[in-house]
Amino acid sequence: MPYVVMRLEHARLIDGTGKEPIEDATVIVDKAGRIAYAGSAGSAPQTPEVPARDLTGMTVLPGFIDAHVHFLFDPTTSGTTQDQALVTFQVAERMHQTLCAGITSVRDLGGLSSGYSTAQRDGLIEAPRLLTAGRILGHTGGHCDATGPDGYNPTARFTILADDERSARVGVRTLLRDGADVIKICATGGMGSPHDDPDDEDLSEAEIKAVVDEAHRHRGKKVAAHAQGTAGILNALRGGVASIEHGYGMTDEACELALAKGTYLVPTLATAFHPLDPAKVSPAHFEKKTRWADKTRENIALAINQGVAIAMGTDAGVSPHSRNLLELSFLVQLGMTQLHAISAGTLNGARLLGIDEFVGSVEAGKLADLLVTDIDPLNDIAGLANSEHIRLVLQSGTVRKDTLPAWTRSDADIQAITLR
Protein backbone atom coordinates (compact mmCIF):
# COMPACT_ATOMS: atom_id res chain seq x y z
CA MET A 1 0.00 0.00 0.00
CA PRO A 2 1.30 3.53 -0.79
CA TYR A 3 2.41 5.69 2.11
CA VAL A 4 -0.73 6.64 4.04
CA VAL A 5 -1.30 10.15 5.33
CA MET A 6 -4.85 9.95 6.68
CA ARG A 7 -7.12 7.27 8.08
CA LEU A 8 -10.78 7.99 8.83
CA GLU A 9 -12.57 5.42 11.00
CA HIS A 10 -15.97 4.58 12.47
CA ALA A 11 -17.85 6.83 10.03
CA ARG A 12 -20.98 6.24 8.04
CA LEU A 13 -19.90 6.12 4.38
CA ILE A 14 -22.18 7.27 1.56
CA ASP A 15 -20.02 6.70 -1.51
CA GLY A 16 -22.02 8.62 -4.14
CA THR A 17 -22.86 5.61 -6.31
CA GLY A 18 -26.39 5.24 -4.92
CA LYS A 19 -25.50 2.20 -2.81
CA GLU A 20 -26.76 1.93 0.73
CA PRO A 21 -24.48 3.50 3.37
CA ILE A 22 -21.75 1.48 5.02
CA GLU A 23 -21.87 1.82 8.79
CA ASP A 24 -18.58 1.72 10.70
CA ALA A 25 -16.56 2.41 7.57
CA THR A 26 -12.88 3.18 7.08
CA VAL A 27 -11.42 5.47 4.42
CA ILE A 28 -7.66 5.60 3.88
CA VAL A 29 -5.95 8.37 1.88
CA ASP A 30 -2.44 7.90 0.49
CA LYS A 31 0.43 10.31 -0.09
CA ALA A 32 -0.58 10.87 -3.72
CA GLY A 33 -3.93 12.26 -2.56
CA ARG A 34 -5.87 9.23 -3.71
CA ILE A 35 -8.21 6.90 -1.89
CA ALA A 36 -6.29 3.73 -0.97
CA TYR A 37 -9.25 2.03 0.70
CA ALA A 38 -12.93 2.76 1.29
CA GLY A 39 -15.23 0.21 2.85
CA SER A 40 -16.14 -1.65 5.99
CA ALA A 41 -13.79 -1.38 8.95
CA GLY A 42 -13.57 -5.16 9.24
CA SER A 43 -11.88 -5.48 5.84
CA ALA A 44 -9.62 -2.45 6.10
CA PRO A 45 -5.84 -2.97 5.94
CA GLN A 46 -3.80 -2.06 9.00
CA THR A 47 -1.80 1.17 8.95
CA PRO A 48 -0.17 1.28 12.38
CA GLU A 49 2.09 4.18 11.39
CA VAL A 50 -0.88 6.50 10.93
CA PRO A 51 -3.09 7.49 13.87
CA ALA A 52 -6.76 7.07 13.06
CA ARG A 53 -9.32 9.85 13.21
CA ASP A 54 -12.42 8.72 15.02
CA LEU A 55 -15.54 9.88 13.15
CA THR A 56 -18.13 8.12 15.27
CA GLY A 57 -21.55 9.61 14.55
CA MET A 58 -20.34 11.39 11.41
CA THR A 59 -20.76 10.76 7.68
CA VAL A 60 -18.15 10.67 4.93
CA LEU A 61 -19.30 11.72 1.45
CA PRO A 62 -17.64 12.49 -1.88
CA GLY A 63 -16.86 16.13 -2.53
CA PHE A 64 -19.90 17.61 -4.25
CA ILE A 65 -20.04 18.94 -7.79
CA ASP A 66 -22.11 21.95 -8.83
CA ALA A 67 -22.62 21.75 -12.58
CA HIS A 68 -24.01 25.27 -12.97
CA VAL A 69 -22.55 28.30 -11.21
CA HIS A 70 -21.66 31.91 -12.06
CA PHE A 71 -18.89 33.05 -9.74
CA LEU A 72 -18.64 36.45 -11.43
CA PHE A 73 -22.06 37.43 -10.10
CA ASP A 74 -23.66 37.71 -6.69
CA PRO A 75 -27.37 38.24 -6.00
CA THR A 76 -26.60 40.64 -3.16
CA THR A 77 -24.59 43.13 -5.24
CA SER A 78 -25.71 45.75 -7.73
CA GLY A 79 -24.58 45.97 -11.32
CA THR A 80 -22.38 48.99 -10.61
CA THR A 81 -19.08 48.82 -12.46
CA GLN A 82 -16.20 48.07 -10.10
CA ASP A 83 -12.44 47.97 -10.34
CA GLN A 84 -11.61 44.64 -11.97
CA ALA A 85 -8.91 43.89 -9.41
CA LEU A 86 -11.55 44.09 -6.69
CA VAL A 87 -13.88 41.86 -8.72
CA THR A 88 -11.11 39.25 -9.01
CA PHE A 89 -10.66 39.11 -5.23
CA GLN A 90 -14.43 38.95 -4.70
CA VAL A 91 -14.63 35.98 -7.09
CA ALA A 92 -11.76 34.24 -5.31
CA GLU A 93 -13.54 34.70 -1.96
CA ARG A 94 -16.80 33.26 -3.34
CA MET A 95 -14.90 30.29 -4.69
CA HIS A 96 -13.20 29.66 -1.36
CA GLN A 97 -16.49 29.87 0.55
CA THR A 98 -18.02 27.42 -1.92
CA LEU A 99 -15.14 24.99 -1.40
CA CYS A 100 -15.61 25.20 2.37
CA ALA A 101 -19.31 24.42 1.84
CA GLY A 102 -18.31 21.02 0.45
CA ILE A 103 -18.23 21.76 -3.30
CA THR A 104 -14.90 20.47 -4.63
CA SER A 105 -15.62 20.78 -8.39
CA VAL A 106 -17.79 23.16 -10.42
CA ARG A 107 -18.72 24.13 -13.95
CA ASP A 108 -18.89 27.92 -14.34
CA LEU A 109 -21.34 28.49 -17.20
CA GLY A 110 -20.68 32.08 -18.09
CA GLY A 111 -18.61 34.93 -16.76
CA LEU A 112 -15.21 33.57 -15.71
CA SER A 113 -12.19 33.41 -17.97
CA SER A 114 -10.04 30.29 -18.11
CA GLY A 115 -7.41 32.09 -16.02
CA TYR A 116 -9.34 31.28 -12.87
CA SER A 117 -9.17 27.58 -13.71
CA THR A 118 -5.42 27.89 -14.26
CA ALA A 119 -5.03 29.72 -10.94
CA GLN A 120 -6.88 26.95 -9.11
CA ARG A 121 -4.93 24.20 -10.84
CA ASP A 122 -1.59 25.92 -10.12
CA GLY A 123 -2.44 26.37 -6.44
CA LEU A 124 -2.65 30.16 -6.52
CA ILE A 125 -6.11 30.06 -4.96
CA GLU A 126 -8.04 27.55 -2.88
CA ALA A 127 -11.19 26.93 -4.88
CA PRO A 128 -13.26 24.14 -6.37
CA ARG A 129 -11.79 22.33 -9.36
CA LEU A 130 -13.09 24.45 -12.21
CA LEU A 131 -14.38 24.03 -15.75
CA THR A 132 -15.20 27.33 -17.45
CA ALA A 133 -17.38 28.29 -20.39
CA GLY A 134 -16.09 31.86 -20.61
CA ARG A 135 -18.69 33.71 -22.66
CA ILE A 136 -22.21 32.53 -23.55
CA LEU A 137 -23.39 32.10 -27.15
CA GLY A 138 -26.85 33.23 -28.24
CA HIS A 139 -28.67 35.25 -30.90
CA THR A 140 -29.39 38.96 -31.31
CA GLY A 141 -32.29 40.03 -29.12
CA GLY A 142 -32.16 36.79 -27.14
CA HIS A 143 -31.15 35.80 -23.62
CA CYS A 144 -27.53 36.88 -24.24
CA ASP A 145 -28.43 40.30 -25.58
CA ALA A 146 -29.39 43.02 -23.11
CA THR A 147 -28.73 45.86 -25.56
CA GLY A 148 -30.88 48.90 -24.80
CA PRO A 149 -32.29 51.57 -27.12
CA ASP A 150 -29.05 53.55 -26.70
CA GLY A 151 -27.04 50.66 -28.13
CA TYR A 152 -25.30 49.79 -24.86
CA ASN A 153 -25.17 46.08 -23.97
CA PRO A 154 -24.15 45.56 -20.32
CA THR A 155 -23.68 41.83 -20.96
CA ALA A 156 -21.30 42.25 -23.92
CA ARG A 157 -18.26 41.28 -21.81
CA PHE A 158 -19.51 37.74 -21.30
CA THR A 159 -21.62 37.00 -24.36
CA ILE A 160 -21.16 36.28 -28.08
CA LEU A 161 -24.00 36.86 -30.56
CA ALA A 162 -24.55 34.56 -33.55
CA ASP A 163 -27.42 34.64 -36.02
CA ASP A 164 -26.71 31.82 -38.45
CA GLU A 165 -24.83 28.52 -38.58
CA ARG A 166 -21.62 30.11 -39.84
CA SER A 167 -21.45 32.75 -37.12
CA ALA A 168 -22.33 30.07 -34.55
CA ARG A 169 -19.31 28.05 -35.65
CA VAL A 170 -17.09 31.14 -35.53
CA GLY A 171 -18.41 31.84 -32.04
CA VAL A 172 -17.49 28.34 -30.87
CA ARG A 173 -14.01 28.64 -32.36
CA THR A 174 -13.56 31.97 -30.59
CA LEU A 175 -14.59 30.49 -27.25
CA LEU A 176 -12.31 27.49 -27.68
CA ARG A 177 -9.43 29.79 -28.65
CA ASP A 178 -10.06 31.66 -25.39
CA GLY A 179 -9.72 28.44 -23.41
CA ALA A 180 -13.32 27.35 -22.81
CA ASP A 181 -13.67 23.87 -21.29
CA VAL A 182 -17.36 23.71 -22.20
CA ILE A 183 -19.55 25.66 -24.63
CA LYS A 184 -22.62 27.37 -23.14
CA ILE A 185 -25.42 28.33 -25.52
CA CYS A 186 -28.89 29.81 -25.21
CA ALA A 187 -31.65 27.68 -26.75
CA THR A 188 -34.43 29.80 -25.22
CA GLY A 189 -35.12 33.14 -23.68
CA GLY A 190 -34.95 33.55 -19.94
CA MET A 191 -36.36 34.97 -16.76
CA GLY A 192 -34.02 37.92 -16.43
CA SER A 193 -33.44 38.87 -20.08
CA PRO A 194 -35.19 42.06 -21.18
CA HIS A 195 -36.25 41.17 -24.72
CA ASP A 196 -37.67 37.66 -24.54
CA ASP A 197 -39.53 35.03 -22.51
CA PRO A 198 -38.58 31.47 -21.46
CA ASP A 199 -40.96 30.14 -24.13
CA ASP A 200 -39.15 32.02 -26.91
CA GLU A 201 -36.62 30.08 -28.98
CA ASP A 202 -33.05 31.38 -29.19
CA LEU A 203 -30.53 29.48 -31.37
CA SER A 204 -32.32 27.26 -33.89
CA GLU A 205 -31.96 23.49 -34.04
CA ALA A 206 -29.69 23.80 -37.09
CA GLU A 207 -27.51 26.39 -35.33
CA ILE A 208 -27.30 24.18 -32.23
CA LYS A 209 -26.23 21.23 -34.37
CA ALA A 210 -23.49 23.41 -35.86
CA VAL A 211 -22.32 24.41 -32.37
CA VAL A 212 -22.28 20.79 -31.16
CA ASP A 213 -20.38 19.65 -34.25
CA GLU A 214 -17.81 22.42 -33.92
CA ALA A 215 -17.30 21.77 -30.21
CA HIS A 216 -16.99 18.02 -30.74
CA ARG A 217 -14.29 18.55 -33.37
CA HIS A 218 -12.17 20.19 -30.67
CA ARG A 219 -11.24 17.19 -28.51
CA GLY A 220 -14.87 16.29 -27.90
CA LYS A 221 -15.85 19.42 -25.97
CA LYS A 222 -19.41 19.34 -24.61
CA VAL A 223 -22.24 21.82 -25.03
CA ALA A 224 -24.53 22.99 -22.23
CA ALA A 225 -27.80 24.61 -23.29
CA HIS A 226 -29.71 27.23 -21.31
CA ALA A 227 -33.16 25.90 -22.18
CA GLN A 228 -36.30 26.79 -20.25
CA GLY A 229 -39.30 26.63 -22.60
CA THR A 230 -40.36 23.37 -24.23
CA ALA A 231 -39.69 24.27 -27.88
CA GLY A 232 -36.11 25.31 -27.15
CA ILE A 233 -35.53 22.26 -24.94
CA LEU A 234 -36.57 20.01 -27.83
CA ASN A 235 -34.33 21.94 -30.25
CA ALA A 236 -31.38 21.50 -27.89
CA LEU A 237 -32.03 17.80 -27.37
CA ARG A 238 -32.34 17.15 -31.10
CA GLY A 239 -29.24 19.27 -31.64
CA GLY A 240 -27.17 16.93 -29.47
CA VAL A 241 -26.25 18.99 -26.41
CA ALA A 242 -24.76 17.24 -23.37
CA SER A 243 -27.01 18.98 -20.85
CA ILE A 244 -30.23 20.91 -20.56
CA GLU A 245 -29.78 23.74 -18.06
CA HIS A 246 -32.92 24.67 -16.09
CA GLY A 247 -35.36 22.58 -18.18
CA TYR A 248 -38.41 24.22 -16.69
CA GLY A 249 -40.61 23.21 -19.64
CA MET A 250 -39.75 19.50 -19.62
CA THR A 251 -42.59 17.37 -21.00
CA ASP A 252 -43.13 13.66 -21.60
CA GLU A 253 -41.72 14.12 -25.11
CA ALA A 254 -38.66 15.96 -23.81
CA CYS A 255 -38.06 13.33 -21.11
CA GLU A 256 -38.32 10.53 -23.67
CA LEU A 257 -35.84 12.28 -25.96
CA ALA A 258 -33.42 13.03 -23.11
CA LEU A 259 -33.50 9.37 -22.07
CA ALA A 260 -32.91 8.20 -25.64
CA LYS A 261 -29.93 10.53 -26.12
CA GLY A 262 -28.45 10.18 -22.62
CA THR A 263 -28.72 13.94 -22.07
CA TYR A 264 -28.38 15.30 -18.54
CA LEU A 265 -30.84 17.69 -16.95
CA VAL A 266 -29.43 20.34 -14.60
CA PRO A 267 -32.62 21.82 -13.11
CA THR A 268 -31.22 24.69 -10.94
CA LEU A 269 -34.20 24.48 -8.60
CA ALA A 270 -32.87 27.19 -6.30
CA THR A 271 -34.18 29.71 -8.80
CA ALA A 272 -37.67 28.19 -8.61
CA PHE A 273 -37.82 27.67 -4.82
CA HIS A 274 -36.38 31.03 -3.76
CA PRO A 275 -38.98 33.82 -4.05
CA LEU A 276 -37.90 37.07 -5.67
CA ASP A 277 -38.09 40.42 -3.92
CA PRO A 278 -40.20 42.56 -6.28
CA ALA A 279 -38.38 45.65 -5.02
CA LYS A 280 -35.05 44.32 -6.35
CA VAL A 281 -36.00 43.13 -9.85
CA SER A 282 -37.88 44.51 -12.81
CA PRO A 283 -41.65 43.95 -12.94
CA ALA A 284 -41.19 41.80 -16.06
CA HIS A 285 -38.64 39.57 -14.31
CA PHE A 286 -40.86 39.19 -11.24
CA GLU A 287 -43.90 38.35 -13.37
CA LYS A 288 -42.05 35.73 -15.43
CA LYS A 289 -40.58 33.96 -12.44
CA THR A 290 -43.87 33.95 -10.52
CA ARG A 291 -45.70 32.56 -13.56
CA TRP A 292 -43.15 29.77 -14.06
CA ALA A 293 -42.56 28.66 -10.44
CA ASP A 294 -45.34 26.06 -10.14
CA LYS A 295 -44.85 24.87 -13.70
CA THR A 296 -41.15 24.32 -12.99
CA ARG A 297 -41.77 22.17 -9.94
CA GLU A 298 -44.32 20.03 -11.80
CA ASN A 299 -42.11 19.49 -14.85
CA ILE A 300 -38.90 18.71 -12.95
CA ALA A 301 -40.87 16.26 -10.77
CA LEU A 302 -42.00 14.62 -14.02
CA ALA A 303 -38.40 14.31 -15.23
CA ILE A 304 -37.34 12.79 -11.90
CA ASN A 305 -40.20 10.30 -12.07
CA GLN A 306 -39.32 9.39 -15.68
CA GLY A 307 -35.71 8.63 -14.70
CA VAL A 308 -33.97 11.39 -16.67
CA ALA A 309 -30.30 11.65 -15.65
CA ILE A 310 -29.99 14.65 -13.33
CA ALA A 311 -26.87 16.47 -12.19
CA MET A 312 -26.98 19.06 -9.42
CA GLY A 313 -26.67 22.68 -10.46
CA THR A 314 -27.67 25.76 -8.50
CA ASP A 315 -27.20 28.81 -10.74
CA ALA A 316 -25.23 30.22 -7.80
CA GLY A 317 -24.62 33.85 -8.60
CA VAL A 318 -28.29 34.18 -9.45
CA SER A 319 -29.03 32.20 -6.27
CA PRO A 320 -26.80 32.59 -3.18
CA HIS A 321 -23.23 31.30 -3.14
CA SER A 322 -22.05 28.70 -0.59
CA ARG A 323 -25.61 27.44 -0.01
CA ASN A 324 -25.28 25.07 -2.96
CA LEU A 325 -26.25 21.89 -1.15
CA LEU A 326 -29.74 23.20 -0.41
CA GLU A 327 -30.41 22.10 -4.00
CA LEU A 328 -30.38 18.47 -2.82
CA SER A 329 -33.37 19.09 -0.57
CA PHE A 330 -35.30 20.61 -3.48
CA LEU A 331 -34.68 17.48 -5.54
CA VAL A 332 -35.97 15.38 -2.65
CA GLN A 333 -39.08 17.56 -2.33
CA LEU A 334 -39.83 16.79 -5.99
CA GLY A 335 -39.62 13.03 -5.54
CA MET A 336 -35.97 12.01 -5.56
CA THR A 337 -34.64 9.81 -2.77
CA GLN A 338 -31.91 11.22 -0.55
CA LEU A 339 -29.36 8.73 -1.91
CA HIS A 340 -30.20 9.59 -5.50
CA ALA A 341 -30.03 13.30 -4.74
CA ILE A 342 -26.54 12.80 -3.31
CA SER A 343 -25.57 10.90 -6.47
CA ALA A 344 -26.94 13.78 -8.56
CA GLY A 345 -24.51 16.04 -6.71
CA THR A 346 -21.54 13.71 -6.92
CA LEU A 347 -21.14 10.88 -9.45
CA ASN A 348 -23.71 12.20 -11.94
CA GLY A 349 -22.07 15.61 -11.90
CA ALA A 350 -18.66 14.03 -12.45
CA ARG A 351 -19.99 12.05 -15.40
CA LEU A 352 -21.50 15.16 -16.97
CA LEU A 353 -18.26 17.10 -16.52
CA GLY A 354 -16.23 14.17 -17.86
CA ILE A 355 -14.15 13.81 -14.70
CA ASP A 356 -15.73 10.66 -13.21
CA GLU A 357 -12.53 8.68 -13.77
CA PHE A 358 -10.97 10.78 -11.01
CA VAL A 359 -13.74 12.09 -8.73
CA GLY A 360 -17.44 11.79 -7.94
CA SER A 361 -17.45 8.76 -5.65
CA VAL A 362 -15.53 7.39 -2.68
CA GLU A 363 -13.76 4.48 -4.34
CA ALA A 364 -10.21 3.17 -4.20
CA GLY A 365 -8.00 4.75 -6.86
CA LYS A 366 -9.94 7.99 -7.18
CA LEU A 367 -8.72 11.34 -5.93
CA ALA A 368 -9.56 11.95 -2.29
CA ASP A 369 -12.21 14.61 -2.78
CA LEU A 370 -14.05 13.98 0.48
CA LEU A 371 -16.13 15.74 3.05
CA VAL A 372 -17.18 14.86 6.56
CA THR A 373 -20.43 16.11 8.03
CA ASP A 374 -21.69 15.87 11.60
CA ILE A 375 -25.28 15.17 10.45
CA ASP A 376 -26.95 12.19 8.83
CA PRO A 377 -27.90 13.52 5.38
CA LEU A 378 -30.41 10.70 4.88
CA ASN A 379 -32.42 12.17 7.77
CA ASP A 380 -31.59 15.86 7.32
CA ILE A 381 -30.42 16.49 3.77
CA ALA A 382 -31.25 20.20 3.99
CA GLY A 383 -28.76 20.44 6.86
CA LEU A 384 -25.89 19.97 4.42
CA ALA A 385 -26.54 23.51 3.16
CA ASN A 386 -25.34 24.88 6.52
CA SER A 387 -21.60 25.11 6.06
CA GLU A 388 -21.08 24.70 9.82
CA HIS A 389 -22.13 21.06 9.41
CA ILE A 390 -19.35 20.48 6.85
CA ARG A 391 -16.53 19.70 9.26
CA LEU A 392 -13.76 18.41 6.98
CA VAL A 393 -13.11 19.02 3.27
CA LEU A 394 -10.37 17.24 1.35
CA GLN A 395 -9.52 18.05 -2.24
CA SER A 396 -7.11 15.65 -3.93
CA GLY A 397 -6.14 14.59 -0.40
CA THR A 398 -5.26 18.14 0.71
CA VAL A 399 -7.09 19.49 3.75
CA ARG A 400 -9.06 22.57 2.71
CA LYS A 401 -11.17 22.85 5.85
CA ASP A 402 -10.99 21.14 9.23
CA THR A 403 -13.36 22.06 12.05
CA LEU A 404 -13.64 18.55 13.48
CA PRO A 405 -13.84 18.45 17.27
CA ALA A 406 -10.62 17.82 19.16
CA TRP A 407 -11.70 14.38 20.34
CA THR A 408 -11.48 13.03 16.76
CA ARG A 409 -7.70 13.37 16.58
CA SER A 410 -4.53 13.03 18.58
CA ASP A 411 -1.34 15.09 18.61
CA ALA A 412 0.32 12.46 16.44
CA ASP A 413 -2.51 12.74 13.94
CA ILE A 414 -2.05 16.50 13.68
CA GLN A 415 1.65 15.98 13.12
CA ALA A 416 1.02 13.42 10.37
CA ILE A 417 -1.19 15.90 8.51
CA THR A 418 1.28 18.76 9.00
CA LEU A 419 4.15 16.68 7.55
CA ARG A 420 2.40 16.58 4.20
Image: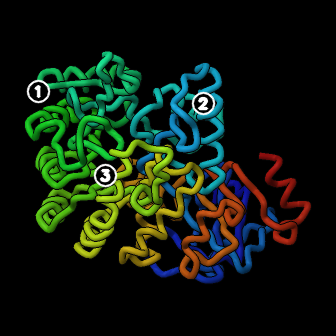
Q: Secondary structure at mark 2?
A: loop
Residues under numbered marks 1 and 2 in contact, where contact means CB atoms less than 8 Å apart: no
Q: Are marks 3 and 2 in contact (CB under 8 Å)?
A: no
Q: Residue at x 29, y 20 (%)?
A: 149
Looking at the picture, which amino acid does disc 2 mark?
Answer: Asp
Element carrying mark 3: helix
Residue found at the far top of this picture: 151
Q: Quadrant of residue 261?
A: bottom left
Circle 1 residue? 165
How far apart in space, not on screen, are marks 1 and 2 (Cα)?
37 Å
Residue at horizontal 14%, vertical 65%? Answer: 256
Estimate the x, y position of residue 292 in percent, counting from the top left.
29, 59
Q: Which mark is residue 288?
A: 3
* Figure quadrant of residue 43: bottom right
Q: State the image coordinates of residue 223 (x, y, percent, origin top left).
A: 27, 40
In front: mark 3 or mark 2? 3
Q: How busy is the neighbourhood of tag 3: few (under 14 within 10 Å), some, or many (20 plus)? A: some
Residue 418, percent from left and from top: 83, 48
- Which tag is nearer the camera, tag 3 or tag 1? 3
Q: Which residue is mark 2?
A: 122
